[in-house]
Amino acid sequence: MSKRNYKATMVLDPRGNEGGSDEFISQMSDVIRSVEGEVKKVENLGPRDFARNSSSNLSNGVYFQFDIEAEPELPSRLLKKLSLEKNVDRIVVERL
């Protein structure tokens, strides 16, 4: 199969996060590689307030964008894998 380009936007839950942004980027890059994706570019978009609070009463988060090249199965694999991560509050994967 041919590889496709994706953009994954992840929101880090800032509560109780001992590691910094670099550690989060490293962890998420490892997760992406574990589901057979290749990270092309990472951008730290910084902290932002949410328009609506989530069910966990979180009012803001730190946003990151990962440009990824991978097989078409990446979005479902990545969402399944990241559903277990407690420090990731939200994730959106879109095809470019």
Image (cartoon, rainbow, N blue to C red):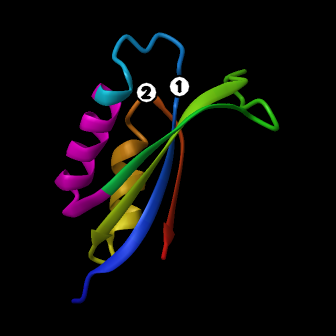
Q: Amino acid at mark 2?
A: Lys
Q: Main secondary structure of the magenta part?
A: helix
Helix, strand or loop at label 2? It is loop
Asked if the magenta segment contains residue 43, the reply would be no
Q: Position of residue 70 (x, y in %)?
A: 27, 71
Q: Earlier in the sequence, mark 1 or mark 2?
A: 1
- How many angstroms separate mark 1 from mark 2 (CA)? 8 Å
- Which of the 4 quarters of the picture holds residue 51? top right
Residue 86 badge: 2
Q: Are marks 1 and 2 in contact (CB under 8 Å)?
A: yes
**Image position of 35 with respect to 27: above or below:** below
Residue in the image at 37% along x and 10% along y: 18
Left or right of residue 68, residue 17 in this image:
right
Q: Which residue is disc 1 drawn over?
A: 13
Q: What amino acid is labelled 1 in the image? A: Asp
- Crowding at dot 2, Cα within 10 Å, few <14 / some 14-19 / many 20+, comes out as few
Vertical placement of residue 10 versus 15, above or below: below
73 sits to left or right of 86: left
Residue at image coords 23%, 58%: 35
- State the residue in front, 9 or 81: 9
**Residue 31 vs residue 45: left or right?**
left
The span picked out in magenta is 23-40
* 54 sits left or right of 91 in the view: right
Q: Position of residue 17 (x, y in %)?
A: 43, 15
Q: Position of residue 67 (x, y in %)?
A: 38, 61
Quarter of the image that includes the N terminus = bottom left
